[in-house]
């Protein structure tokens, strides 16, 4: 892969790779460092990239694995998801605050999910990846990804409803 091909095909993935790293690490500086490490490794492996069918999935998997390695090495146990949901426009009086509260609750619940369901829900619902692409990134088959996503959404829905009902359910 030439310098021009790398710039044309791999460099434009930087925003997606950054958001994925941010979702996993929960820290902007760590995510930026991870993005730089990922691009360094991708550049080193640029000749191997020619033989790949899905370079984007390979890059996403690489950033995910590097982030997980960093989490394991530094034992980071803080909230992993922040600033990934788009802020909604005001729909009526008082609704903006309600939406912000709901976003905060959903983010907190998603951040408490185990790593794989959290990654799958982020890739599908935030990044908009297709099931086949997510399967390639996380290393599972599409059927397993669908089950993981369904269970993650159900867990989030139940916990959010419980929180919003003040635990009176």
Image (cartoon, rainbow, N blue to C red):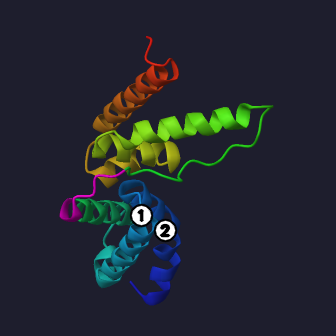
x, y (%) of residue 95? 72, 32
- Which quadrant: the C terminus? top left
The reply to whether callout 2 and callout 1 are in contact (CB within 8 Å) is yes
Residue that lies at the very extreme toward the right in this rendered image:
93
Along the viewing direction, whichever of 117 and 163 lies nearer the viewer: 163
Q: What element carries label 2?
A: helix
Label 2 to label 1, Cα distance in Å? 7 Å
Which residue appears at 65% of the width and 32% of the height?
98
Which residue appears at 30% of the width and 63% of the height?
67
Q: Which of disc 1 and disc 2 is earlier in sequence? A: 2
The answer to which quarter of the image holds residue 93 is top right
Residue 130 in view: no
x, y (%) of residue 90? 77, 39
Q: How crowded is mark 2: few (under 14 residues within 10 Å), some or many (20 or more)?
A: some
Which residue appears at 80% of the width and 32% of the height?
92
Which residue appears at 40% of the width and 72% of the height?
35
Q: What element carries label 1?
A: helix
Please give the residue where the numbered disc 2 appears in the rendered image.
13
Please give the residue where the numbered disc 1 appears in the rendered image.
56
x, y (%) of residue 33? 38, 75
Q: Give the range drawn in magenta.
A: 72-78
Residue that lies at the very extreme toward the bottom in this rendered image:
3
x, y (%) of residue 56? 41, 63
């Amino acid at each position: 892969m030439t310098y021009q091909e790398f710039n044309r095909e791999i460099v434009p993935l930087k925003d997606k790779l950054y958001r994925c790293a941010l979702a996993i690490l929960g820290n902007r500086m760590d995510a930026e460092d991870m993005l730089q490490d990922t691009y360094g490794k991708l550049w080193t492996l640029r000749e191997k990239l020619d033989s790949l069918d899905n370079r984007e999935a390979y890059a996403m998997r690489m950033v995910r694995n590097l982030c997980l390695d960093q989490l394991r090495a530094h034992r980071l146990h803080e909230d992993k998801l922040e600033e990934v949901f788009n802020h909604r426009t005001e729909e009526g009086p008082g609704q903006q605050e309600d939406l912000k509260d709901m976003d905060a609750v959903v983010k907190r619940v998603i951040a408490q999910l185990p790593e794989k369901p959290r990654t799958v829900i982020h890739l599908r619902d935030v990044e908009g990846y297709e099931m086949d692409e997510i399967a390639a990134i996380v290393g599972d088959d599409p059927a397993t990804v669908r089950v993981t996503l369904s269970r993650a959404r159900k867990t989030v829905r139940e916990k959010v409803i419980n929180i919003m009902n003040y635990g009176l359910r």
